[in-house]
Image (cartoon, rainbow, N blue to C red):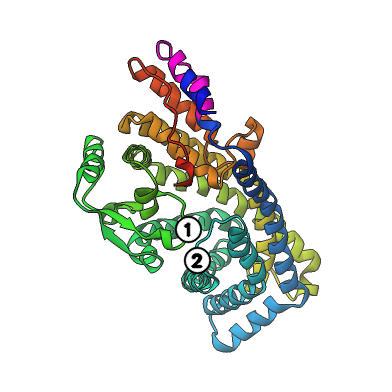
């Protein structure tokens, strides 16, 4: 294969061939490695369906055995006010639902990841982090649900609109506090050492007025070997974070390319825009709930022990409707993210000026993302551009911006580094 790469590089030195350059990168993923990547990613398509069916089944069990009604009755023993009753109902619903779904979570989050060699943790460490995440959700989720039901009681006709605003406030708070209070519960963050690489990142950030006071490294290698980075937080909590895999498994050119991409997310205000568009979809989902859930309760409420929509025992009914809606809305959520990723790719290439570094980084993601896909497949299931499209964009940028560009053969075995 490398004889072909050498001849391709020599034959295109004068006129850079974007398609040939793209194929050079794509062909570095062959055989069992490619089949494994494709199988993992395509299997994820089915997980969307099976995950929805599992969620629906669990909510149906709550209703069939009148568990949510029992939770409501227990709440009424402790609280006289509806807010407190709803909080207790939501708390018990969250705990029991988590316990019932635990086998599914273990399979999808641990067993399957181990099967594809994408998780480095043992079960104990993995499960410990699941417990931390569950504890965090127990703090926020029942409170959010209690507020939503308060809105339902106060504005029974327009609650879905005000409820969308409530979700937006919670999302804003999570974006604010997560980098400082939640992320450190899972990883240790340390300031990046001074040196040429940090200087390049700072220079890129300053060129686009991105705050670069906090550039942190976090030890994600203890969980897996995937490379990642982000610009997170708002206002005083803004920070640039790179995982240790990015530094240890990639070249300086790849790190710069990835950081240019991440700076693009911040500079293009992707965080607030993403929240806005996601809230639009969530608002539609709550509107659907406001129409479908009362019909279901009117028809089956006596059997379930559910009085009306404002009754916190209706929580599994809302869960079923939302599960179906969010599964059908998967392409919409994916496209919000993928459009922004495309924009950040373009920004990152201009900022980092490392097209081959970006192409190599895109290929590394093939460990868990199918590298080539049809347009329909990408539209339905991809949260990011396919590796093929990212490599081609990089090579096109190189053809447009690099004088006397030549095709570079990636180092042999670089994907296994």
Residue lying furthest bottom? 77
Instruction: Please name the residue that numbered disc 2 is placed on.
Output: 121
Label 1 secondary element: loop
Residue that protrudes farthest toward the front in the picture: 3
- Residue neighbourhood size for the residue with mark 2, other residues' Cα within 10 Å, grouped as few (<14), some (14–19), many (≥20): some
Q: Is residue 183 magenta?
A: no
Nearest the viewer among 93 and 398 is: 398
Label 2: state its secondary structure: loop
Residue shown at the point (65%, 36%) measured from the top left? 377
Residue 215 falls left or right of residue 166: left
The percent coordinates of residue 130 (x first, y second) are 52, 70
User: Where residue 323 sits in the image (x, y, percent)?
Assistant: 66, 57
Q: Indicate yes or no whether the magenta region holds residue 20.
A: yes
- Magenta residues (range): 8-24
Q: Can the viewer see residue 232 in this picture?
A: no
Q: Are marks 1 and 2 in contact (CB under 8 Å)?
A: yes
* 27 left or right, relative to 270: right
Residue to which mark 1 is pinned: 224
Answer left or right for 128 relative to 284.
left
Q: Nearer the viewer, residue 217 or 333?
A: 217
């Amino acid at each position: 294969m490398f004889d072909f790469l050498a001849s391709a590089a020599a034959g295109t030195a004068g006129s850079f061939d974007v398609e040939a350059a793209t194929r050079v990168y794509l062909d570095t993923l062959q055989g069992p490695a490619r089949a494994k990547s494709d199988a993992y990613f395509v299997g994820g398509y089915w997980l969307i369906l099976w995950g929805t069916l599992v969620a629906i089944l669990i909510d149906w069990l709550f209703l069939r055995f009148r568990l949510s009604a029992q939770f409501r009755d227990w709440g009424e023993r402790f609280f006289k006010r509806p807010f407190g009753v709803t909080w207790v109902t939501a708390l018990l619903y969250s705990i029991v639902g988590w316990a019932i779904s635990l086998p599914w979570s273990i399979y999808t989050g641990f067993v399957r990841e181990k099967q594809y060699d994408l998780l480095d943790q043992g079960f104990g460490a993995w499960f410990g982090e699941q417990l931390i995440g569950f504890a965090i959700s127990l703090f926020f989720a029942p409170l959010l649900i209690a507020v939503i039901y308060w809105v339902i009681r106060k504005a029974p006709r327009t609650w879905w609109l005000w409820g969308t605003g409530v979700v937006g406030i919670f999302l804003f708070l999570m974006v604010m506090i997560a980098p400082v209070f939640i992320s450190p519960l899972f990883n240790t963050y340390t300031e990046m050492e001074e040196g040429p690489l940090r200087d390049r990142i700072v220079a890129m950030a300053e060129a686009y007025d991105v705050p670069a006071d906090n550039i942190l490294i976090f030890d994600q290698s203890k969980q897996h070997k995937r490379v990642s980075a982000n610009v997170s937080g708002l206002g005083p909590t803004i920070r640039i974070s790179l995982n240790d895999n990015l530094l240890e498994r990639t070249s300086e050119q790849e790190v710069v390319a990835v950081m240019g991409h991440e700076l693009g997310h911040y500079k293009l205000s992707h965080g607030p825009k993403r929240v806005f568009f996601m809230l639009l979809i969530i608002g539609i989902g709550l509107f659907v709930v406001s129409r479908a859930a009362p019909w279901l309760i009117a028809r089956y409420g006596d059997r379930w022990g559910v009085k009306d929509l404002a009754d916190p025992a209706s929580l599994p009914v809302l869960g079923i409707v939302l599960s179906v809606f969010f599964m059908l809305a998967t392409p919409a959520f994916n496209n919000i993210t993928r459009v922004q990723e495309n924009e950040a790719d373009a920004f990152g290439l201009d900022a980092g000026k490392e097209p081959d570094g970006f192409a190599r980084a895109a290929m590394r993601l093939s460990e868990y993302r199918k590298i080539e896909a049809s347009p329909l497949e990408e539209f339905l299931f991809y949260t990011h551009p396919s590796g093929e499209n990212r490599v081609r964009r990089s090579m096109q940028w190189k053809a447009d911006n690099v004088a006397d560009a030549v095709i570079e053969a990636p180092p042999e075995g670089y994907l296994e580094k």
